[in-house]
Image (cartoon, rainbow, N blue to C red):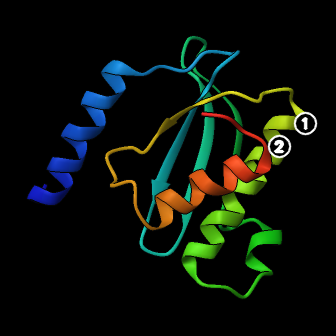
Amino acid sequence: MDTKALRRKKIQLSVRRKISGEKAKPRLSVFRSNTDIYAQLIDDISGVTIASASSKEKDVVAQKVNKTEKSKLVGQSLARKAVELGVTNCVFDRSGYLYHGRVKAVAEGAREGGLQF
């Protein structure tokens, strides 16, 4: 494993020691690949994913915008699904990534969609 990935893994583990999601306030976890971005609302107590969204969904792929704007759409899509399920509060888990760019866009999109964290 290269040093950049190892550094991210260490940050991710230290953050996961401090935060945890539950049914009333799930964890919004973000995963960023080179081409796509994925977001999930996770209940860590029962180990269940409550809702998920990614940049591979049909409504997001149909939009011809750059990756940062797609990330914002992913956040809005996840928030819309969460509000339908009655979830309005969550804990943001950036998964060791810097709160910048696409990760920040997911958070802003989720806030616009009605999630609070």
Label 2 neighbourhood size at 10 Å, few (<14), some (14-19), many (20+)? Answer: some
Secondary structure type for disc 1? helix
Q: Mark 2 is on which residue type?
A: Lys
Q: Which residue is mark 2?
A: 81
Residue 71 coordinates in the image, percent (x, y): 60, 66
Image location (x, y in percent) of residue 37: 54, 62
The reply, left or right, for residue 23 in relation to residue 97 is right
The residue drawn where x is 78% and y is 49% is 113
Question: Would you identify the image quadrant in which residue 43 lies?
Answer: top right
Q: Secondary structure at mark 2?
A: helix
Q: In this picture, is 18 found above or below 35?
A: above
The spot of residue 10 in percent (x, y) is 19, 38
Query: Which residue shows up at 64% across the image and 20% down it?
Result: 25
The residue sitting at the top extreme is 45
Q: Quadrant of the C terminus?
A: top right
Vertical order, 12 against 43 (above or below): below
Apparent side of residue 40 relative to residue 57 in the rendered image (left or right): left
Q: CA distance from mark 2 to mark 1?
A: 5 Å
Name the residue that disc number 1 marks.
84
Rendered residue at 83%/70% (across/down): 59
Evaluate if marks 2 and 1 touch, with contact meaning CB atoms under 8 Å apart: yes
Location of residue 48 in the rendering, given as x and y in whole percent from the top left corner: 64, 24
Q: Quadrant of residue 40?
A: top right
Residue in view at x 27 percent, y 31 percent: 13
Kindly identify the amino acid type of the residue bearing the numbered disc 1: Glu
